[in-house]
């Protein structure tokens, strides 16, 4: 969860496709992340990298 520059709630989605980590951000928006949200994004990216490694090595 993040906010755009106007303060509206938005989502950044993290997933794995064909061994690659994919980020989907709000189209045409700037994501503004609070410190806690940055930690959550970091954790989601870490988990995605682990999943991508498994998918790539399978």
Image (tube, rainbow, N blue to C red):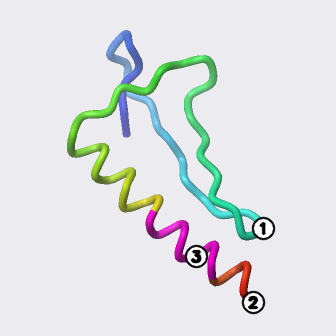
- The percent coordinates of residue 58 (x first, y second) are 75, 89
Residue 6 appears in which quarter of the rendering? top left
Residue identified by numbered label 1 = 18
Residue at figure coordinates x 37%, y 40% from the top left: 1
In primary-sequence order, the first of circles 1 and 3 is 1
Q: Is residue 2 magenta?
A: no
Mark 2 crowd level (few <14, some 14–19, many ≥20, 10 Å Cα):
few
* Pointer 2 residue: 58
Which residue is drawn at the image coordinates 37% and 19% (left, top)?
8
Residue that mark 3 sits on: 51
Range covered by the magenta-colored residues = 46-53
- Magenta span: predominant SS is helix
Instruction: Rate crowding at label 3 as few (under 14), some (14 to 19) or many (20 or more) other CA atoms within 10 Å.
Output: some
Give the SS element for disc 3.
helix
Between the C-alphas of marks 2 and 3, the distance is 11 Å
* Numbered label attached to residue 3: none
């Amino acid at each position: 969860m993040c906010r755009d520059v106007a303060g509206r709630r938005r989502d950044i989605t993290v997933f794995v496709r064909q061994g690659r980590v994919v980020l989907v951000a709000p189209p045409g928006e700037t994501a503004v992340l609070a410190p806690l949200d940055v930690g959550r994004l970091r954790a989601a990216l870490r988990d995605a990298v682990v999943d991508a490694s498994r998918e790539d090595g399978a």
